[in-house]
Image (cartoon, rainbow, N blue to C red):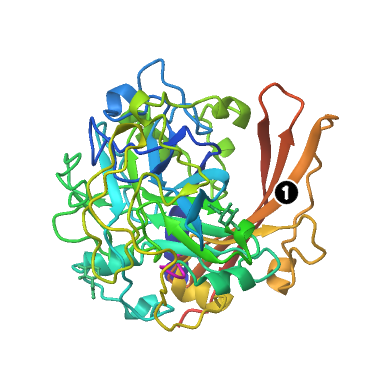
Amino acid sequence: MKSSFAATFVFASSVAAFWRMPCRSQTGYARIDPLVNPGSISDHVHAITGGGNFGADTDFKKLTASDSCTACAVTQDHSAYWTPAVYFQYKNGTTVMVPQVGGMLAYYLYYLDNVKSFPEGFAMIAGNPDTRNFTGPFPDAPLSSWPTDPTDQFFLQQRALGFNCLNYAKTPEASLYRHTFPPKEYMDANCKDGLRLELAFPSCGKEGVLDSPDHRSHVQYPSLVKEGNCPEGFDVHYPFLFFETIWATNQFSGEDGQFLLSTGDPVGTSYHGDFIMGWDSAEFLQSALDTCKSPSGEIEACPLFNIQDDADAAQCTFDMPGDLKDDDCHGPRDGLPVDVPIQYGPEPASQYKIAGASGAATTSIPHTSAPQTYSQSAVSYSPADAASTASAQGGIVVAMESAAGSAHGYGKDTEYGAARPSVTSAPSSASASKDSNAVSTTTITRGNEVIEMVIEETEVTVTAQPTAGSYEKRHLEHHKHHHHARN
Ligand SMILES: *[C@@H]1O[C@H](CO)[C@@H](O)[C@H](O)[C@H]1NC(C)=O
Ligand SMILES: *[C@@H]1O[C@H](CO)[C@@H](O)[C@H](O)[C@H]1NC(C)=O
């Protein structure tokens, strides 16, 4: 018994390692996708962050060129990270981009053993912009009943998307709990603090293979999405890359209409994301993976990282190509940019002709009236049960809670209540106003062990500067190990 306990402990502490890369601003929003549409125009709008040398022909060399800035906090990371943007379409067809809150968090987690750096020139896409259905029970069956053989990659890809209903006054939902947009009425009633979109990337790769024609088939999910068995022939273990972006869907509460991804998707299952490795070198990323194993996930805990503040990171934007300048990605505008047809599924979306330069509308698919009567499969939604979350659901980030402006913003649940952090005061600048205090609880599960962390976040917006900047402090407040009884 003694030896098995010790082994478990070592295993758990290696699994606990991760870091959370904040990329607090976008380098831009544009119909650009250097992987899928190199040198030309993408068929939908992306929210893009990371390296500033981003464009239709971006690659590792360009991202890491000496003149390339980064919108991420660690200046050695010029990787390109992008996802579709989220829109709201009013009943009359007027469409606006939903404001993004706090940029992207890109997690690098080590779930598989012997984690290797992404090689220079590596790129990948997770998810599929054509998918319009979710096939499965909701909520997911317990992980223990999932196939241990990862041959069904579509099954895993569907479960690699998360639509996390944020309500800081309630017990948080698990990450990757639901895999479609919740119905609008449910969001109005429950998601008072917006929606967090989550995307898990495959972490099983092939030695020396940097990319593939579809940018997907050179990487595969392990059998439980984030961990488990890699498919045969995919023996290289990459970090488990996980994107989180929060969208202020709550600003449209009570409005008649529908949420859409820029792909023309009201379902959500077309959510996807792209990554081009742009760390200074594969050697540097490898040494970071080997060295930076703080269970806090704080980038500040890694001695190798050079960290810039959010105001400097926010200066980093890419040059908008002239032929996309008139796209009007934000709206309000009539329909999605640029003339992307709304396709409800469940069959895969049809290809449409990419609208031309300067916003010229050339889609070949007729518009359906918006919003069309669309009913999601009859599933009842309820917040995840925290206990089952920890043992079966396997969330990356279980909570994003706010202590600000609410007497019970945090800590109704006694377990979380015990971890209630103190609020960090804003810097003593007369021009600073405190925006929010958010707390993130991270749970990492392996076997019978659950490691839980609560992180406080204080965001301060400085308004008196010529360029408004956002500063933030994160603190590890609590670190708790549960050792469940072993049999
Ligand atoms: C559509 O409705 C929204 C919300 O009421 C409104 O803001 C917008 O101006 C309307 N658009 C048009 C073209 O009337
Ligand atoms: C569900 O989506 C997948 C991927 O797009 C597709 O292959 C499949 O045909 C769809 N199922 C149905 C019932 O349309």
Residue 298: where, in percent of width, then height?
A: 57, 43
- Classify the position of the C terminus by image quarter: bottom left
In the rendered image, residue 484 lying in the magenta stretch gets the answer: no
When asked about the image quadrant of residue 361, the answer is top left
Residue 336: where, in percent of width, then height?
A: 41, 50
Depth check, front residue: 28 or 139: 28
When asked about the image quadrant of residue 42, the answer is top left
Amino acid type, label 1: Ser
Chain part drawn in magenta: 175-180
Q: Is residue 259 left or right of residue 251?
A: left
Q: Is residue 450 left or right of residue 372?
A: right
Ligand 1 quarter of the rendering: bottom right
Q: Secondary structure at mark 1?
A: strand
Residue 100: where, in percent of width, then height?
A: 55, 47
Provide the residue designation for mark 1. Answer: 436
Q: Is residue 246 visible?
A: yes
Which residue in the rendered view is the most extreme toward the top? 67
